[in-house]
């Protein structure tokens, strides 16, 4: 009964392709996030959704498009993948948008060749 | 934007030793969090601090929220092999969104 789950765990693809990463949380949380962790382990927030509504949208190329079909799911779609997109992408959730404590998924390692 | 400086970047210690790491910020934070990331996993929350001066323990872990609101430290006492991992501080400053800024991480290696 994983709290925050992501699929796939690993994703290897060619430059220029379009790919999606899925995230689901079974904690009943209202808010979900996407983070990018680069090769130096630096974690940076990309997006945040609260009850399916976008509330944080950092400076991220518009090739990245999050989609939240319901408050338990937040998927990340990436168009025209570039080499620099290679990283580990983490989904996280929190009880509400006012909660500081965030619970992270296991990560998706994306490698763009 | 906000910056969090975390140090040291890496540590190699003997099992049983105590460990200390800290984070400093260029701006005031009203919440400090400490996370641990095991290889191949996502970060897991260890300790949350909500008040300046607050000292909180979680087993062998102790963390403090600095009086100036611009720093925090994490201590691990009597380290054991399973303490290996990357430790991240994270802070949130006053604002409308509960957006966390993460430090660059401290890679801890515990030698038997």
Image: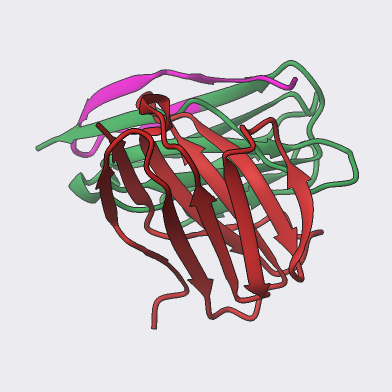
Chain colours: A red, B green
Residue B103 percent coordinates (x, y):
55, 28
**Which residue is found at the position 53% from the left and 55% from the top?**
A76
Residue at image location 63% in from the left, 62% down from the top:
A67
**Residue A50 or A85: which is nearer the viewer?**
A85
Span colored in magenta: B1-21
Along the line of sight, which residue is nearer the eye, B40 or B17? B40
Q: For the view shown, which residue lies furthest in the left direction?
A: B112
Q: Quadrant of the C terminus of chain A?
A: top left
Q: Position of residue B105 (x, y in %)?
A: 44, 29
Question: In terms of image quadrants, where is residue A92?
Answer: bottom right
Q: Is residue B9 magenta?
A: yes
Q: Position of residue B92 (x, y in %)?
A: 75, 39
Q: Is residue B15 magenta?
A: yes
The quadrant holding residue B28 is: top right
Answer with left or right where residue A50 lies relative to residue B87. Answer: right
Left/right of residue A86 with respect to residue B101 in the rendered view: left
Residue, x 30% and y 32% (percent of image)? Answer: B108
**Residue B57 image offset from top left, x and y in percent:** 55, 52
Q: Which one is nearer the viewer's eye here, A85 or A26?
A: A85
Q: Is residue B16 above or below residue A72?
A: above
Residues A79 and B83: in front is A79
Q: Residue at x 57, y 31 (%)?
A: B73
């Amino acid at each position: 009964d994983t709290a925050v789950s992501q699929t796939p765990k690993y994703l290897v693809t060619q430059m220029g392709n379009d790919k999606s990463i899925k995230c689901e949380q079974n904690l009943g949380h209202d808010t979900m996030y996407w983070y990018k962790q680069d090769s130096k382990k630096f974690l940076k927030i990309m997006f945040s959704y609260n009850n399916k509504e976008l509330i944080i949208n950092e400076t991220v190329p518009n090739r990245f498009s999050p989609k939240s079909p319901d408050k338990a799911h937040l998927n990340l779609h990436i168009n025209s993948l570039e080499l620099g997109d290679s990283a580990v992408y983490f989904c996280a959730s929190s009880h509400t948008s006012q909660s500081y404590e965030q619970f992270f998924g296991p990560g998706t390692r994306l490698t763009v060749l | 934007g906000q910056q969090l400086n975390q140090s040291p970047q890496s540590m190699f210690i003997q099992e049983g030793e105590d460990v200390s790491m800290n984070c400093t910020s260029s701006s005031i934070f009203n919440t400090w969090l400490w996370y641990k990331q095991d290889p191949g996993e996502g970060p897991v929350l260890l300790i949350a601090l909500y008040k300046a001066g607050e000292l909180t323990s979680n087993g062998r872990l102790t963390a403090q929220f600095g009086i100036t609101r611009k720093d925090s430290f994490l201590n691990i006492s009597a380290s054991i092999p399973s303490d290996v991992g990357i430790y991240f501080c994270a802070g949130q400053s006053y604002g409308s969104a509960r957006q966390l800024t993460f430090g660059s991480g401290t890679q801890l290696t515990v030698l038997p």
